[in-house]
Image: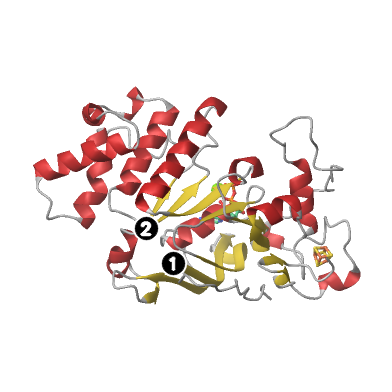
């Protein structure tokens, strides 16, 4: 049984993204005949929507399905069930879940993903010019060579690099500069929506703030919508309008950044917040909640509430049903009937 659809409160602005009951289950094959022996429920019924220009921070421990959600949005992970509504060029909301490559192309230019590891995400044999112009070749094939070169130079300057770097190769750059190159490539097709998958986790702390500031400046300039994925709450809390907390393929909490940080509701979010460092070392978030045990394998998810094996307030009924996200306060949702 999966988690039920959450309804995010609708206000004046239209959505740029509506994800409903999204599931990505990876079949596992074993034995001599490679029969299917099980499935990894990487994403197990996730629903949320986003407004244009918004930043949604998505946090949760390793393996809870964050990257898989991002990949499902751009068709790099197979969607088992659910829908992903995204506006086409004329603004009509279209279900892009599982579209084939050519049907996806007009949408793909408007949703881009920036990956965590700037060392492995850029092809070492391609020049910066080739890397940044690759999406242009696919989505704007009518551009001439000169125009393409100018656009690459312009993009490099937008991300704080010199246009002259276009002829260099990835190994000539630091991690932060490589992430800037990745951003230039993501921006090449004038996207409306960017999935930033832990864009600063692999960088030195001193460089992280520069990249975050750049992301914010680009968001303002190009009216970008961000799905910002992170392990670390302290990275997302300042730049996110809302925060979604993931646990074992489910969204367990969703609310404004202030609400989720200051008044986390779900027992898992409370533990996560209590462990997060505060910018001011003299302040504390209250008593630190240490969770017992490890996250169970998504191959063997507990029945009912996925968190029940570690939940400090679990009760027998928690094994019966997957709790749905309930609106506990205006705009603040948690997937636990007992908070
Ligand atoms: N192609 C695949 N085949 C099988 N299992 C997969 C595949 N991709 C991801 N998984 C599994 O799905 C689960 C979710 O993985 P995912 O990478 O989305 O997590 P994550 O939240 O991004 O973790 P991290 O914080 O470590 O990046 C994990 O158990 C992972 O092993
Ligand atoms: S449903 Fe039960 S196990 Fe799950 S978070 Fe709530 S109390 Fe804990
Ligand atoms: Mg990941």
The outermost residue toward the top is 172
182 or 241, nearer to the observer:
241
Judge whether 184 appears above or below 331 on screen: above
At 44% across and 67% down in the image, what residue appears? 16
Question: Vertical placement of 241 versus 88: above or below?
Answer: above
Residue 122 at least partly seen: no
For this view, does 232 lie left or right of residue 133?
right
Residue 69 x, y percent position in the rendering:
52, 59
Looking at the image, do the residues carrying marks 2 and 1 touch, with CB atoms under 8 Å apart?
yes
Residue at 34 percent of width and 32 percent of height: 160
Q: Upstream in the sequence, badge 2 or badge 1?
A: 1
Image coords of residue 44 (percent x, y): 62, 67
Q: How packed is label 2: few (under 14 Cα within 10 Å), some, or many (20 or more)?
A: many
Residue 213's place in the image compared with 301, above or below, is: above
Near-viewer residue (145 or 295):
145
The correct choice, above or below, for 231 with respect to 35 in the image is: above
Tell me which residue sits at (16%, 39%) in the image.
Answer: 149
Using the numbered discs, state the Cα–Cα distance from disc 2 to disc 1 in whole angstroms.
9 Å
| Residue 61 can be seen, yes or no | yes
Identify the residue at the far front of this view. Answer: 12
Could you say whether the residue bearing mark 1 is in a helix, strand or loop?
loop
**Residue where numbered disc 1 is placed:** 16
Q: Residue 247: name its quadrant.
A: bottom right
- In the rendered image, the quadrant that contains the N terminus is bottom right
Q: How many marks?
A: 2
SS assignment at label 2? loop
Q: Residues within 10 Å of mark 1 (few under 14, many from 20)?
A: many
Name the residue located 77 percent from the left edge and 75 percent from the top edge.
Answer: 321
Identify the disc placed on residue 192: 2
Give residue 73's position: percent from left, percent from top: 45, 62
């Amino acid at each position: 049984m999966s988690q039920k659809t959450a309804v995010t409160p609708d206000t004046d602005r239209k959505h740029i993204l509506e994800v409903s009951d999204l599931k990505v289950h990876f079949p596992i094959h074993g034995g001599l005949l490679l029969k299917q022996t099980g499935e990894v429920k990487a994403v197990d019924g996730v629903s949320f929507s986003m407004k244009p220009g918004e930043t949604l921070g998505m946090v949760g421990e390793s393996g809870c399905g964050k990257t898989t959600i991002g990949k499902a949005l751009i068709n790099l992970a197979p969607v088992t069930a659910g829908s992903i509504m995204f506006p086409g060029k004329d603004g009509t909301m279209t279900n892009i879940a599982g579209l084939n490559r050519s049907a996806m192309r007009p949408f793909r230019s408007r949703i881009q993903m920036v990956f965590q590891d700037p060392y492995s995400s850029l092809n070492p044999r391609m020049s910066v010019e080739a890397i940044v112009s690759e999406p242009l070749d696919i989505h704007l094939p009518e551009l001439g060579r000169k125009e393409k070169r100018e656009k690459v130079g312009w993009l490099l300057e937008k991300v704080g690099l010199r246009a002259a770097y276009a002829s260099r190769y990835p190994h000539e750059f630091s991690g932060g500069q490589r992430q800037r190159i990745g951003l230039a490539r993501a921006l090449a097709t004038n996207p409306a929506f960017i999935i930033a998958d832990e864009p600063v986790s692999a960088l030195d702390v001193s460089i992280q703030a520069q990249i975050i500031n750049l992301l914010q400046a680009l968001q303002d300039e190009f009216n970008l919508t961000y799905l910002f994925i992170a392990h670390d709450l302290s990275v997302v809390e300042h730049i996110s309008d809302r925060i979604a907390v993931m646990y074992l393929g489910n969204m367990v909490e969703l609310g404004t950044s202030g609400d989720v940080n200051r008044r986390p509701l779900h027992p898992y979010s409370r533990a996560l917040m209590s462990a997060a460092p505060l910018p001011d070392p003299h302040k504390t978030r209250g008593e630190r909640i240490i969770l017992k045990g490890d996250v169970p394998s998504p191959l063997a998810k507990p029945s009912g509430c996925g968190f029940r094996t570690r939940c400090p307030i679990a009760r027998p009924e928690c094994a019966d049903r997957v709790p749905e996200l309930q609106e506990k306060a205006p705009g603040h949702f948690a997937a636990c009937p007992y908070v």
